[in-house]
Image (tube, rainbow, N blue to C red):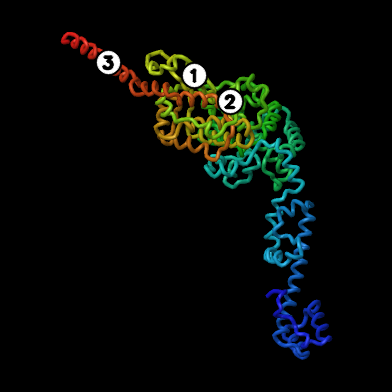
C-alpha cells in the first residue's frame, strides 16, 4: 500500500469535526487499543468498516517506520561517534545511512533487516576499520622481521612451513602436537644454568628481556595479545637457552652420547629443520646477548660472535659448497635478523648483482633442451656461490659453435655456467622458507626468488631435468628426474617479483637464441657434432663425399 494513494482517504461527508480530531489523535499517538476496538469506535461515528481498517493499517505502518528511523539514527550515531571519521564512515556505509528524507522508505527497506541482528551485521565491518592503536602499529612495519607465511604460499605446501618437532617463539607456542619437547627444553635449561660461571647471569638476562619485551614483540608481524609480559619473557628465555645449549652440544657431540637429540641423526635433523622455519624464529639479538655470558666450554674455541656458532650448526643447509667455511669479513657489517636470514645470507655472493625492473615477457628464458639445441653448453662449476650464475662466450669465436666439439676448444662455445645444486629431501623446505621470507621482508632484493625463477624457466619437462642432471649442474637424491621437475616447478607457484638480478644473462641468452646464424651453427653442432662418435662419423662422411666428387670430376675430364 502506498501512503500517497487515494484508496484510504475519508469522505468529508462521513466524518464530523469530532471524528476527524479523534482519528488524527489516534493515528499519531495512540497504540494501546486493539484493531477490533478501533473499528467499533469509528463505526459508531459513522465511518465505514473498510476505511477504518485501512486507516489503522496505515497508522501502524507509520509508527513502525518512525520506530525504525529512530533505531537507524541511534545506530548510525553510535558508529560515527566510535570511528570519529564521518567522511570515511559515509564512504563505507553510504548504502545504508539515511541521508535524505525523500529516500527514507528505501533506506528503511535496506537497513531494517540488518538491525534485527545489529551485532552480527556490523561486527565484521567495524572490526575492519583500524583503531588508533592499529594505525600506530602499521607505522612500525620496519621493525617486523618474523612473519606469518602468506596464505597463498601456505596453501601450496603447508608442511614445508610448519614445525614437526619443536616450537620456537610465540607463533606455534602451546601447540598440542609439539608439547613433548617442552620437557626437554627445561632439561636443557638446567644444563645451561650449570654452565654459567656467574649464577646471576640468567637474572641479568631476564631483566634484559623484560626491558626489551615491547621491542621483541614488534619483531613479529602477528600480535600476541593473549600472551602476558611474564609469559612472553619466560617463553623467549626458555627457547633462547634451549637453542644455545643445543648448538653447544652439537659442537661437542662426543661428550653427550646419552642425549638422543644430538646422537639420533633423524631427530637432530628434524630439530635443525624446525629451527630454520620462518614462523619458528626468535630475534638474533636475543641469542647474541645470551652468548655474551661465559658459557662456552674451554674445549670449544669460543667464536667472537654467536653467528659463527649458528653458521656452523646449519652448515649442511648450504648445498653450493662441499665445505662451507665461516668468513668473518663477509659477516662483519651484516645485521642478521634470525636463522632464516642467516641461511639466506649464506646463499648470497659477496658482490650482489643490481636488480632491474622487468616485464613478464622480458624475463622469459627458453628451456634447457631448447638452449642446448641452439648451441649453448651447460657446465657445472665448483667453489662458487649458488647464485653466481654466468653466461660466457667469446665475441668472434662464438659464431662458429660447430667447432666447439673439438677437445679443449672452449673458445668456440657459448657456456651457461651453473654452480652445482645438490637437491635432497630438505632442499624444498629450505627454499620455500627463504622465498617466503623474501616475499615479506626483501621485496626489492628477491635474490633467492630470482635464482629459483631462473632454474624453473630452464626446467619444464623431464627431458630438461635429465639434461641438467647429465651435465651435473644439478645432483639429487630424489626418486627420479620427474620428481625433480615437479619440485622445481612447484617452488614458484604464487611467487611474485618485478625485478631480477639476472637481467643481463637473460638478455644475452635470448639474444644468442634469436640469432639465426648462431642457431644454425648450434643446430649443426647438435645434429652432427654432439659427441665424439657422431663427430667422427660426420667427418668421415664429409671426406668420402669430397673424395667422391673429386673422382667424379676426374673421370669426367678423362671421358670428355
Pick the quarter of the image with the N terminus.
Answer: bottom right
Q: Badge 3: few (under 14), some or many (20 or more) residues near its Cα, within 10 Å? A: few
Instruction: Provide the residue designation for mark 3.
Output: 540
Which residue sits at x=71%, y=26%?
A: 292
Sequence-earlier tag: 2 or 1: 2
Is there a contact, CB below 8 Å, between mark 3 and mark 1? Answer: no
Name which quarter of the figure residue 337 lies in.
top right
Which residue sits at x=78%, y=56%?
A: 80
Sequence-earlier tag: 3 or 2: 2
Instruction: Provide the residue designation for mark 1.
Output: 392
Tell me the element at label 1.
Answer: strand
Which label lies toward us, 2 or 1?
A: 1
Name which quarter of the figure residue 330 lies in.
top right
Residue 438: x and y in percent read: 60, 34
Mark-to-mark CA distance, 3 and 2: 49 Å
Q: Nearer the viewer, residue 141 or 5?
A: 5
- 46 w.r.t. 175: above or below: below
- 223 w.r.t. 497: above or below: below
Pick the quarter of the image with the C terminus.
Answer: top left
Tell me the element at label 2.
Answer: loop
Instruction: Provide the residue designation for mark 2.
Output: 348
Amino acid at each position: 500500500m502506498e501512503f500517497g494513494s487515494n484508496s484510504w482517504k475519508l469522505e468529508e461527508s462521513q466524518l464530523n469535526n469530532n471524528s476527524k480530531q479523534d482519528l488524527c489523535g489516534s493515528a499519531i499517538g495512540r497504540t494501546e487499543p486493539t484493531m477490533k476496538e478501533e473499528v467499533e469506535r469509528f463505526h459508531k461515528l459513522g465511518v465505514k468498516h473498510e476505511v477504518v481498517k485501512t486507516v489503522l493499517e496505515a497508522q501502524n505502518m507509520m509508527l513502525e517506520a518512525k520506530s525504525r528511523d529512530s533505531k537507524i539514527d541511534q545506530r548510525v550515531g553510535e558508529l560515527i561517534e566510535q570511528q570519529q571519521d564521518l567522511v570515511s564512515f559515509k564512504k563505507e556505509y553510504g548504502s545504508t545511512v539515511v541521508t535524505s528524507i525523500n529516500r527514507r522508505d528505501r533506506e528503511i527497506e535496506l537497513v531494517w533487516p540488518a538491525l534485527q541482528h545489529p551485532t552480527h551485521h556490523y561486527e565484521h565491518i567495524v572490526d575492519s576499520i583500524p583503531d588508533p592503536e592499529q594505525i600506530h602499529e602499521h607505522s612500525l612495519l620496519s621493525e617486523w622481521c618474523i612473519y606469518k607465511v602468506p596464505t597463498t604460499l601456505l596453501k601450496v605446501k603447508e608442511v614445508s612451513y610448519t614445525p614437526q618437532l619443536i616450537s620456537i617463539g610465540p607463533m606455534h607456542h602451546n601447540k598440542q602436537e609439539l608439547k613433548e619437547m617442552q620437557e626437554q627444553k627445561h632439561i636443557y635449561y638446567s644444563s645451561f644454568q650449570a654452565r654459567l660461571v656467574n649464577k646471576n647471569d640468567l637474572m641479568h638476562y631476564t631483566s634484559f628481556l623484560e626491558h626489551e619485551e615491547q621491542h621483541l614483540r614488534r619483531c613479529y608481524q602477528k600480535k600476541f595479545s593473549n600472551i602476558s609480559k611474564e609469559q612472553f619473557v619466560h617463553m623467549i628465555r626458555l627457547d633462547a637457552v634451549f637453542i644455545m645449549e643445543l648448538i653447544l652440544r652439537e659442537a661437542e657431540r662426543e661428550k653427550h652420547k646419552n642425549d638422543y637429540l644430538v646422537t639420533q641423526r633423524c631427530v637432530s635433523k628434524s630439530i635443525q629443520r624446525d629451527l630454520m622455519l620462518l614462523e619458528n624464529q626468535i630475534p638474533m639479538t636475543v641469542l647474541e646477548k645470551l652468548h655474551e655470558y661465559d658459557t662456552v666450554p674451554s674445549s670449544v674455541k669460543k667464536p667472537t660472535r654467536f653467528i659463527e656458532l649458528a653458521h656452523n650448526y646449519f652448515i649442511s643447509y648450504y648445498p653450493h659448497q662441499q665445505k662451507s667455511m665461516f668468513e668473518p669479513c663477509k659477516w662483519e657489517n651484516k645485521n642478521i635478523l634470525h636463522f632464516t636470514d642467516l641461511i639466506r645470507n649464506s646463499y648470497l655472493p659477496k658482490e650482489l648483482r643490481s636488480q632491474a625492473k622487468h616485464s613478464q615477457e622480458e624475463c622469459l628464458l627458453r628451456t634447457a633442451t631448447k638452449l642446448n639445441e641452439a648451441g649453448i653448453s651447460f657446465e657445472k662449476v665448483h667453489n662458487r656461490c649458488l647464485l653466481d650464475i654466468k653466461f660466457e662466450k667469446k665475441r668472434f669465436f662464438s659464431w662458429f659453435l660447430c667447432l666447439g666439439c673439438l677437445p679443449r676448444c672452449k673458445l668456440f662455445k657459448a657456456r651457461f655456467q651453473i654452480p652445482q645444486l645438490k637437491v635432497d629431501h630438505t632442499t624444498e623446505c629450505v627454499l620455500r622458507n627463504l622465498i617466503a621470507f623474501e616475499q615479506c621482508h626483501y621485496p626489492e632484493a628477491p635474490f633467492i626468488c630470482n635464482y629459483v625463477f631462473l632454474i624453473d624457466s630452464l626446467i619444464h619437462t623431464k627431458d630438461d631435468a635429465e639434461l641438467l642432471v647429465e651435465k651435473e649442474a644439478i645432483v639429487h637424491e630424489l626418486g627420479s628426474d620427474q620428481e625433480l621437475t615437479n619440485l622445481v616447478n612447484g617452488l614458484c607457484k604464487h611467487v611474485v617479483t618485478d625485478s631480477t638480478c639476472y637481467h643481463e644473462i637473460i638478455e644475452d641468452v635470448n639474444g644468442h637464441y634469436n640469432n639465426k646464424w648462431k642457431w644454425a651453427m648450434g643446430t649443426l653442432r647438435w645434429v652432427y657434432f654432439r659427441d665424439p662418435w657422431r663427430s667422427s662419423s660426420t667427418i668421415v662422411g664429409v671426406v668420402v663425399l669430397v673424395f667422391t666428387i673429386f673422382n667424379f670430376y676426374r673421370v669426367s675430364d678423362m671421358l670428355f
